[in-house]
Amino acid sequence: MNIRNLVNTMGIFSYVLARLGCLALFLMMGLTVVDVFMRHAFNKPILGSFEITRYLIVILIFAFIGHAQSQKSHVNVDIFVNAFPKKVQALIDLFNYSVSLILMILVTWKGFEKAMESMATGDSPMNLPVPEYPFVFFLAFGCGIMCIELVRDVLRIIFKKLREESRL
């Protein structure tokens, strides 16, 4: 398997995860509508709806994070950066991606540790007998996908710079 196939596979995987995030958003909206209706119409709210919504938010955010990076959809304040030459812009991007990669590696690592701890202790909310660890694992997994996307971006900048230097 060459690098281009791996990049294409990652793109497909990020897209599928983003669709999972869409499903989580749809379920969260439906749950909220039904919960509000039940609360006001029958004075019977859905037990555990807050916890379910919390879990769905984790799925929503961390399913989209890698896809957003692959599409360069994250918030980017470039009012000053655009004034710099292209080489300086590339160095700033390299710095930003590298720092983001380090931070996301830390979040992935600590998220995985927290998931293992949660699995060992059997953490679950009081109103809902659903364990937390699968969702914490999903957090770590989503951050891992983000790390792969950031590595791809760092390598893309480095190899582009090397190609430009070899032409000189």
Image: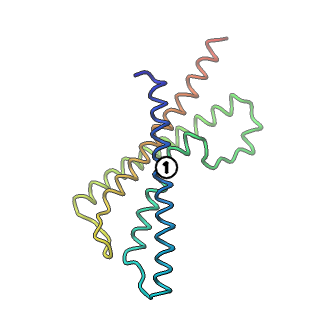
In which quadrant of the rendered image does the C terminus lie? Answer: top right
Q: Position of residue 79 (x, y in %)?
A: 75, 45
Q: Nearer the viewer, residue 12 or 84?
A: 12
- Is residue 155 positioned above or below 105 on the image? above
- Left or right placement of residue 82 versus residue 55 in this view: right
Q: Residue at x 47, y 75 (%)?
A: 34
Q: Position of residue 142 (x, y in %)?
A: 43, 48
- Is residue 109 positioned above or below 91 on the image? below
Secondary structure category for the residue under label 1: helix
Mark 1 is surrounded, within 10 Å at the Cα level, by few (under 14), some (14 to 19) or many (20 or more) other residues, namely: some
Colouring used for the render: rainbow
> Looking at numbered disc 1 in the image, what kind of residue is underneath it?
Arg
- Left or right placement of residue 112 versus residue 43 in this view: left
How many numbered tags mark residues here?
Answer: 1
Q: Residue at x 68, y 34 (%)?
A: 89
Q: Nearer the viewer, residue 6 or 155?
A: 6
Q: Nearer the viewer, residue 154 or 42?
A: 42
Q: Residue at x 61, y 22 (%)?
A: 161
Residue position for label 1: 19
In which quadrant of the rendered image does the N terminus lie? Answer: top left
- Is residue 30 positioned above or below 83 on the image? below
Residue sticking out furthest to the left: 120
Residue sticking out furthest to the front: 41
- Is residue 112 positioned above or below 87 on the image? below
Q: Position of residue 134 (x, y in %)?
A: 32, 56
Q: Residue at x 75, y 35 (%)?
A: 84
Q: Position of residue 49 (x, y in %)?
A: 41, 73
